[in-house]
Image (cartoon, rainbow, N blue to C red):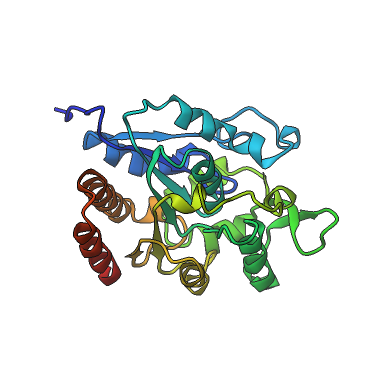
Amino acid sequence: MEKAIMNNNPHFVLVHGAGHGGWCWFKLLSLLRSAGHHATVIDLASAGTDPTKLDDVASIHHHVQPLMDLIEGIPQQQKVVLVGHSYGGLLISLAMEKFPHRILVSVFVTGYMPHFHCPPAAVLQKLFMSLSVETVMDCEFKFGDDPEMPNSVVYGHNFLRQKLYKNCSEEDLELGKLLVRPFKMFFEDLSKESVLTEAKFGSVDRVFIVCEGDEVMEEKFQRLMIEEFPPKAVKYIYGGGHMVMLSKPKQLYQHLIEVAESFSSINQCNDPQVFSSFEKLAALN
């Protein structure tokens, strides 16, 4: 029998990365819901099964509006555990800025983790400037005024197999080939000053999950973001690669449950010693 879901339990909101949709979380979603947790996935505008055409999405705010609507509709008494994968890290950052008091903790799963000291595009630019032709393989890029940052990207099948889905099963790879869509980077929107502020975005607790074997967001880049803007805790998944929700769903599930329980305890008792213990534990993972 499925466990009863309590209204005061945190609500897991899972935000997909570029080119993907809510479908990529299906294994993790099943684990969370089977254990009796609140969990919701979404399709952002022009992503997943959303019918919006890519050319009709004028801004990143249009793209991320389904996430904002979802959080707005969650009961006030429920805190949100906001989980962003890859490019989804930038998107949950916008939600952190808008709803800082609604979010228990934000979890960046091998995700872009920006700093409020500079525009979010800075972290995008650092990664793209480090990429080689060999890394991007058969992906297709469309450029605008900036020759270094693409407007839109289409994943190539070789890139999907050898980089993005390298640690996944053949079934997961074929699912990705069927469902991934072209996507925009919204570099101009993310280059604006004061998109993220210390008072709002900076007030939300963050956890980063490092994924070993990721050949898209390489581990050295993940650790660079952690060093430049240290989160409250860091977790680690061995052999997960980039699409860790498909390759290692049980490990990711366990980390998310531990994070939610730890931050719920901290939030309820407001005891600095509890938080200190959690930081020490996380540092060992």
Q: In this view, does 183 lie to the left or right of 105?
A: right
Q: Is residue 281 left or right of residue 57?
A: left
* Rendered image quadrant of residue 64: top right
Q: Give coordinates of residue 142: x percent, y percent.
A: 78, 53
Q: Is residue 196 left or right of residue 25?
A: right
Residue drawn 51% across the image and 70% down it: 228
Residue drawn 27% across the image and 46% down it: 267
Q: In this view, does 14 lie above or below 282?
A: above
Q: Is residue 232 above or below residue 78?
A: below
- From the image, which quarter does the C terminus lie in? bottom left
Q: Give coordinates of residue 26: x percent, y percent.
A: 39, 39
48 vs 226, nearest the viewer: 226
Residue drawn 42% across the image and 50% down it: 204
Residue positioned most to the left? 1
Q: How many marks?
A: 0
Residue positioned most to the right? 145
Q: Give coordinates of residue 280: x percent, y percent.
A: 24, 68
Q: Give coordinates of residue 83: x percent, y percent.
A: 42, 47
- From the image, which quarter does the N terminus lie in? top left
* Rendered image quadrant of residue 180: top right
